[in-house]
Amino acid sequence: MWPRRRKQPAPTTAPPTPDPAPTTARDLIPSEVVQDVWTVLIDTFRRSHGPPTLADLEAVYKESELVQAVLFELIQAISTCDVSASLAMRTLLEHPNPVQDFSQFMTSCLIAYVTTGRLYVLKLPIGSKATQQLNVLRSSAVTITQGTFEDPYRSIAYADGRNTYPQLSPDDVIARVSPSAEDALAPASSIEASWDSIQLDLARIRFQRAALLRLPFLVGVCETTHASIKGQRDELQSSLSSIMGGQTVVLPEGAKLTTPGLGQDSITLPGLAQQCESRVCATNNVPAILVGFQAGLDKSTYSNYEEARRSYHDETIRPLLLQLSDTFSRGLNDEVVFSISTPSADAGREGDDYVAEATD
């Protein structure tokens, strides 16, 4: 007789081992989402670090709303100034070229001078004493061969892709530079002086845009101390997605909803915008209160607004007009005087209309 076999116990199926639950809400967010938001600020500023080129200075007027707002305040005053000159010069300045009137021409002059510290105006026809056109040249397209003190500009060349003048005489160009400490012919602009503040403000805006685009990833993340399997997590994730649609979400026991990564204060970066505004306004000698920046509005009253307006005229606009008057008088061999009305000390008081007094 064969020995009886022992009955083998039925194989038992081990219960499924739950996937390890994430320990923090950050583990449920793609790492690049949180990381990229913060590196936007660093990488943007890092790429812009270093001295700007002339092309960078010219482009920042279009790129930076901060620069455009400050220059707009200057443009409003300069582009509508009065002109005292001979009939021939007034006629020329009324329509200096086929595509610009006086206001547009002065705007181009101001943008070039403030952003790059250089103003070059070409007189046409070349070599003629009877100037018929004035054209503001792009500073980055001008090449100057410097000479001695007696002959500072040996030659001037210009090429912007559409217009090419390989050999210009200094008499063909009205030129003014804002001198730096190292050399009278090595210009320094107020925009260049505040370049880091401008780039920091641009980085702040790009950072906030990147943060807002990632908000859906930063809302509705659930933390729980209980272990869960993948199916449970998928179901929870599906229900959490309804948050953006305004529906009610019921969380399991022990779970809580968090918004990791960036809080409201982190996105707004408190104080950074005001710091950049005040620096750029200071280097251009434009009161922040006149531009409407928060840095100026925080301390604004009617009286200090009027005082800022008069100070701005006396300390910024009048000196700038004197510089431009001298430049065009020398360049055109004829006296040209730019002026603007002075705000009255009593302007706007007791409900009176605005009163202006002519400059001397």
Image (cartoon, rainbow, N blue to C red):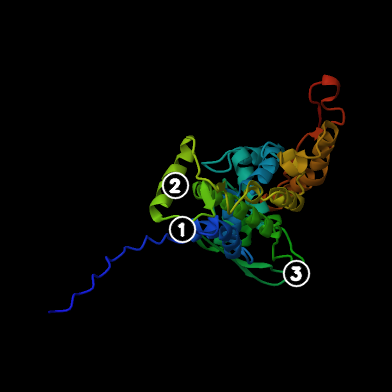
Callout 3 crowding tier (Cα within 10 Å): few <14, some 14–19, many ≥20: few
Q: Is residue 283 depicted above or below 353 in this figure?
A: below
Position of the N terminus by quadrant: bottom left
Residue, disc 3:
182
Outermost front residue: 1
Give the camera-side residue of 103 and 353: 353
Give the camera-side residue of 291 and 245: 245
The picture places residue 128, in percent across and down from the top left corner, at: 57, 53
Give the camera-side residue of 84 and 13: 13
Q: CA distance from mark 2 to mark 1?
A: 60 Å
Q: Which mark is residue 294?
A: none
Residue, disc 2:
236
Asked where in the image residue 46 lies, by quadrant, the reply is bottom right
Outermost left residue: 1
Asked where in the image residue 190 lies, by quadrant, the reply is bottom right
Callout 1 crowding tier (Cα within 10 Å): few <14, some 14–19, many ≥20: few
Q: Nearer the viewer, mark 2 or mark 3?
A: 2
The picture places residue 183, in percent across and down from the top left corner, at: 74, 68
Q: CA distance from mark 1 to mark 3?
A: 32 Å
Looking at the rendered structure, the secondary structure element under dot 1 is loop
Amino acid type at image mark 2: Leu
Looking at the rendered structure, the secondary structure element under dot 2 is helix
Q: Nearer the viewer, mark 2 or mark 1?
A: 2
Residue, disc 1:
161
Amino acid type at image mark 3: Glu
- Whichever of labels 2 and 3 marks the residue nearer the N terminus, that label is 3
Position of the C terminus by quadrant: top right
